[in-house]
Amino acid sequence: MSENSSAQSGTAVADDPAGRPMVRVEKLHRSYGTGAAAVHALRGVSFDIPRGELVALKGRSGSGKTTLLNLVGGLDSPDEGRITVDGVELSALGEDGLLELRRDRLGFIFQSFGLIPILSAAENVGVPLRLRKADPREREERVALLLALVGLADHAAQRPGELSGGQQQRVAIARALANRPKLLIADEPTGQLDAETGLAVMELLRAVVRSEGVTALVATHDPQLLGLADRVLELRDGEIVEQ
């Protein structure tokens, strides 16, 4: 089945990864509002992200970072331009295809952690696997592996309220990896953490990219964290001004 025919059916299909970037963004425009009141969040943004890299996205508040992450993650649609993730052009997918893409190939990490308060750390990590109706034994093994990977094997039974902010973000990272995504998208993942804890979380993301073989696009404003990235993209007034 060709990519085009699969896209028309609303299903995301794997493409040959040889020589292809994980993410390709081409001449992306996104505005909010109309007329004189319109806000131009993105103005012709283009870049590639090679597979297996951790790319940091920096820029002041209002520079367009979150808008760009939402577009790459299939949570919003551009006014103009094209986004390709893992060989799949997002504009060619229907809503079902976008849901499948987000479920099977993407992992999201947010500043606010987004954990379910009444669930334990292990149960939070296992949520994506339950939604996929994974085999219980497979789910338990994957959860245990991920909690060990993020250094929380001894905290599996604790609920978010019993964990520090850094520990909660580690649980969120483990949850984002549950379905073995190919791309991690993180929006200011250290924004609620102190400098030392934030650096530890960013170092963990760096290690995860290597150990799990994933690609990561991370928005951050912290200069100390930018040095851990393979490459830094700077957004200013909706445009890429430095790579």
Image (spheres, rainbow, N blue to C red):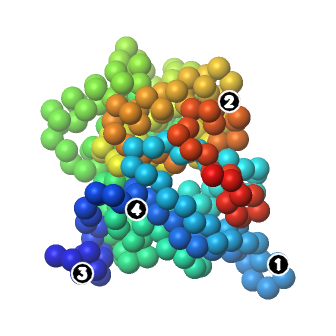
Marks 3 & 1, CB-CB < 8 Å contact: no
Vertical arrangement, residue 76 with respect to residue 117, above or below = below
Provide the secondary structure element on which disc 2 rests.
helix
Provide the secondary structure element on which disc 1 rests.
helix
Type of residue at label 3?
Ser
**Number of numbered discs:** 4
Depth order, front residue of 83/158: 83
The answer to which of marks 4 and 1 sits earlier in the sequence is 1
**Residue 127 at what x, y percent from top left?**
34, 42
**Residue 112 at what x, y percent from top left?**
59, 40
The answer to which of marks 4 and 3 sits earlier in the sequence is 3
* Image-quadrant location for residue 7: bottom left
Mark 2 highlights which residue?
A: 224
Labelled disc at residue 85: 4
Distance, label 2 to label 3, CA atoms, is 45 Å
The answer to which of marks 4 and 2 sits earlier in the sequence is 4
Provide the secondary structure element on which disc 4 rests.
strand
**Residue 92 at what x, y percent from top left?**
38, 78
Distance, label 4 to label 3, CA atoms, is 17 Å
Q: Residues within 10 Å of mark 2 (few under 14, many from 20)?
A: few
The answer to which of marks 2 and 1 sits earlier in the sequence is 1
Viewer-side label of 2, 3: 2
Type of residue at label 1?
Ala
Vertical arrangement, residue 219 with respect to residue 117, above or below = below
Depth order, front residue of 145/161: 145
Mark 1 highlights which residue?
A: 37
Labelled disc at residue 5: 3
Marks 4 & 1, CB-CB < 8 Å contact: no
